[in-house]
Image (cartoon, rainbow, N blue to C red):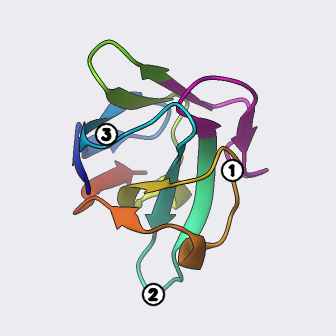
Amino acid sequence: QVQLVESGGGLVQTGGSLRLSCAASGRIFPSYAMTWFRQGPGKEREFVAGIAWGGGPKYYSDSVKGRLTISRNNANHTLYMQMNNMKPEDTAVYYCAARNSIVVVRSTGDYAYWGQGTQVTVSS
């Protein structure tokens, strides 16, 4: 089993920054893909960024490329997302997710493990 706990959400003004964290515990292996999704008001949950737990390429949605950076610290089993130059359309609940595969995919149905989510609100 894998447990994921997000933190770091909050209220920020347009152009501001936040750093989200996802603490992972349980049987996390280097082959696990780790991903951030988000769900805005009245919208479906969507892929934001992903990385294999053991490292490798990073993947981003077009809407966040250049503003958000995903990273991980294997020593303390934590996944991060640095969010810069934030926009009101970034307002959403952000979820950390994991799957037992090295391949990062963008479909929510392919992830077995989810955190509870952390709210991010960007004011205009």
Near mark 3 (Cα within 10 A), the count class, few <14, some 14-19 or many ≥20, is: some
Q: Earlier in the sequence, mark 1 or mark 3?
A: 3
Q: CA distance from mark 1 to mark 2?
A: 26 Å
Residue 99 at x, y = what percent?
Answer: 51, 57
Asked whether, in this view, residue 35 is left or right of residue 95, the answer is right
Q: Nearer the viewer, residue 82 or 74?
A: 74
Q: Answer yes or no: do the residues labelled 1 and 3 have beta carbons within 8 Å?
A: no
Query: Is residue 34 in sight in this rendering?
Result: yes
Query: Between 113 and 117, which is closer to the camera in this rendering?
Result: 113
> Magenta segment: does it hold 93?
no
Q: Position of residue 66 (x, y in %)?
A: 72, 29
Q: Quadrant of residue 24?
A: top left
Label 2 neighbourhood size at 10 Å, few (<14), some (14-19), many (20+)?
few
Residue 46 coordinates in the image, percent (x, y): 59, 69
Q: Residue at x 25, y 44 (%)?
A: 9
Q: Nearer the viewer, residue 113 or 19?
A: 113
Type of amino acid at the residue the image marks with label 2: Gly
Disc number for residue 42: 2
Please name which of the two marks, 2 or 3, marks the residue nearer to the observer.
2
Q: Please state which of the two labelled residues, at mark 1 or mark 3, is closer to the viewer.
A: 1
Mark 1, residue position = 104
Quadrant of the image containing the N terminus: bottom left
Kindly indicate whether the residue at mark 3 contacts the one at mark 2 (C-beta within 8 angstroms).
no
* Residues drawn in magenta: 51-71
Residue at the image point whose x is 71% and y is 49% from the top: 103
Other-residue count near label 1 (Cα within 10 Å), few / some / many at <14 / 14–19 / ≥20: many
Q: Which of the 4 image quadrants contains residue 31?
A: top right
Disc with the residue nearer the chain's start (2 vs 3): 3
Q: Which residue is mark 3?
A: 12
Residue 45 image position (x, y, % from top left): 51, 75
